Image (spheres, helix red, strand yellow):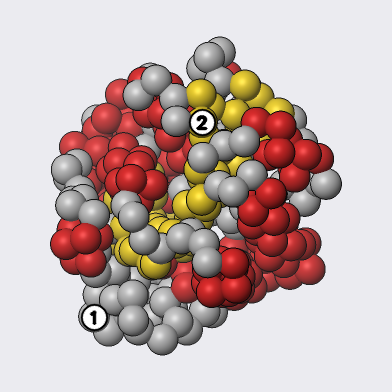
Amino acid sequence: MRAMVTGGAGFIGSHLVDALLARGAEVHVVDNLSTGSRENLDSAATLNQFDIRDEALEGLAEQVRPEVVFHLAAQADVGTSVEHPIFDAKVNVVGTVRVLEAARAANARVIFTSSGGAVYGECERPAREEDDPQPLSPYAASKLAGEQYLATWNRLHGAAHVICRLANVYGPRQLPSLEGGVVAIFLDRMRDGQAAEIFGDGNQTRDFVYVGDVVAALLAAAASLGGGVYNVSSGVTTTIRELHRLCAEAAGVEQEPRFAAERQGDLRRSAIDSSRAARELDWRTEMTLAAGVARTWNASV
């Protein structure tokens, strides 16, 4: 396989690159290194350092002729999207259109990572793919717009692009500087002997899925025959208070969190049903949250 991975030097992308290389794939990474790092990349992958909005993307695709483009590059911070919605839209909407056109030039298939936790909005029950999205932040709206472009390209050009709506992904290499990486943030604070901060009362729930399980889902989506939308999640809801306890246990510390005011755009309840992926892609999570947090901690010390 010849694969292109946008955002391939980042958290999820670099784990995907490792898995592709392990399968003997030829891997071309596109990353502007704004949040990604060369240190995350295996030297066997080819790094092309530019932005997904750059016209060079289409030329690279025509030259490399990838069979599949894994599109992970994004502006992924909710707070940034609230403060700078135009920038968020340029990266997540215009950048996605650029990726779709580059893939079309190479006759390649796109596997797009969206955010299930953000796109569905508040969830009274685990959200299913057919549920109406209710985005509550510019970030969520921009990811949903990207999804609609993929669906349009499937109808307009007869493509078979796939959308994977990810729950809250965590694992080694995640940056504590980005608000979405709450596991990384908690563990980073605990490593430094600082109190971890919880926004709100800590009883808000999230669906956490380990990065290795996410990579397996993306590869399963690439191996599937048709297009469509798939949730990628553990299906288990965990409060932020409980997550803090698991992180403290993994770090071997006894620590109480510090509480702060709720943030604009944050969800109260987020849960995702991944039964379609289990049924159609034969994919299921393997890592429990406790084991995954422990593995993340051990990888960082």
Residue furthest right in the image: 55
Q: Is disc 1 placed on a helix, strand or loop?
A: loop
Residue 167 coordinates in the image, percent (x, y): 36, 59
Crowd tier of the residue under label 1, counting other residues whose Cα lies within 10 Å: few below 14, some 14–19, many 20 or above: few
Residue 289 coordinates in the image, percent (x, y): 22, 46
Crowd tier of the residue under label 2, counting other residues whose Cα lies within 10 Å: few below 14, some 14–19, many 20 or above: some
Give, as a three-letter code, the residue at label 2.
Arg
Q: Quadrant of the N terminus?
A: top left
Label 1 sits on residue = 125
Q: Mark number for residue 71?
A: none
| Labels in figure, total | 2
Q: Residue at x 69, y 56 (%)?
A: 101
Decide if residue 107 is in sight here: yes
Q: Residue at x 50, y 43 (%)?
A: 68
Measured in 3D between alpha carbons, the distance from the residue under mark 2 to the one under mark 1, in whole angstroms, is 39 Å
Decide if residue 147 is in sight here: no
Label 2 sits on residue = 2
Classify 26 as above or below 170.
above
Q: Residue at x 46, y 40 (%)?
A: 12
Q: Earlier in the sequence, mark 2 or mark 1?
A: 2
The answer to which of 124 and 47 lies nearer the viewer is 47
Q: Quadrant of the C terminus?
A: top left
The answer to which of 84 and 146 lies nearer the viewer is 146
